[in-house]
Amino acid sequence: MTTTSVAQVESGRALRAPARGRRLRRRATLIGWSFILPNFLGFALFTLIPVIAALGLSFMSWDAYNPPKWIGLANFTRLAHDPLFWAALQNTVLYAVGHVPLTLALSLGLALLLNRKLKGIQFFRVAIFFPYISSLVAIAIVWNLLFDPSTGPINALLTHLGVANPPGWTSSTTWALPAVIITSVWKDMGYYMILFLAGLQAVPGELYEAAAVDGANAWHKFWNVTVPGLRPTTFFVLVILTVSSFKVFDLIFVMTEGGPGRATLVLSQLIYQDGILNGQFGYSSAISLVLFVMVLVITLFQYRLQNRRQD
């Protein structure tokens, strides 16, 4: 009798165990969804749906007052013959070519310099990071004053050093884009310095000790220990920097408004002008689609390059 009861209890437990496991898995799934659902809804509402809408609008003509009209590839045909688009594309690429390597090199250099246990080192880290959290408008105005060809301290210093014809900076079609790049690098390098500092502190100190035992000098330690140890951080910084460089808008809009002439006109500003100011939402969507594809291709190329290095 006792043996039969025990067998029945064990059989009941065996039947209840899968049901309990399913309830636990369902509960864990619901908890997981409760964490990611708000973020996913925000992404879908403010990013995914607008991107899909822009994709559709790029094949239409729409001024926000009349119903959208399907025009096929007409926006892309117009874009291919638009000199403003090509000027903006050239400036965007030049800005990225100047901004990405300079910011990468300076932020890495600052991180190496400030990755030391010195008294007051926190002050210098905060001071370099501070421009990143400062008002962009204030930064643009201050740098416009610094770059002023007549009264700015930069040209005064260059004249004092013997430069006969200092640059016109933001009033010059030649120097306006370099002036914007300098300002942007100064603003962003503090943020990327923090990322490199975190990466440097994750490199095991035993590797440097082993390199020192092998007789490696400072350059060999940097090239054979620091650079490989920072590879994941460098890849992340490179991707984020590239994407932000191709999306630049606010700093240029405040400093130069795309001028003088077309000297600092970039694709983001051209999208704003054609879409918001001129009401050509279809055409501006076509430009934004081209910009999206460019950034996507470059990012995929960087991912592939990174994977090849890891292999």
Image (tube, grey):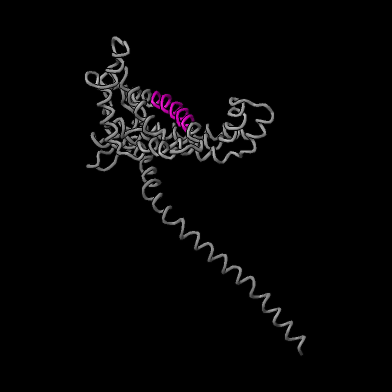
Question: Above or below — where is 84 with respect to 197?
Answer: above
Q: Is residue 293 visible?
A: no
Coordinates of residue 263 in the picture (x, y in percent): 30, 21
Give the prevailing secondary structure in the magenta stretch: helix
Coordinates of residue 93 in the picture (x, y in percent): 40, 25
Q: Residue at x 52, y 32 (%)?
A: 302
In the picture, measured across the screen, residue 163 lies left or right of residue 31, that is left
Front-most of residues 164 and 117: 117
Magenta span: 93-110
Q: Residue at x 29, y 22 (%)?
A: 262
Coordinates of residue 254 in the picture (x, y in percent): 26, 32
Queried whether the magenta region covers residue 212, the answer comes back as no
Question: Above or below — where is 51 with respect to 17?
Answer: above
Queried whether the magenta region covers residue 102, the answer comes back as yes
Quadrant that contains the N terminus: bottom right
Question: Above or below — where is 15 with respect to 127?
Answer: below
Front-most of residues 21 and 179: 179
Q: Is residue 86 visible?
A: yes
In the picture, measured across the screen, residue 258 lies left or right of residue 117, that is left
Question: Above or below — where is 2 with respect to 274?
Answer: below
For the image, the number of numbered tags is 0
Q: Residue at x 69, y 82 (%)?
A: 9
Coordinates of residue 44 in the picture (x, y in percent): 40, 50
- Quadrant of the image occupied by residue 268: top left
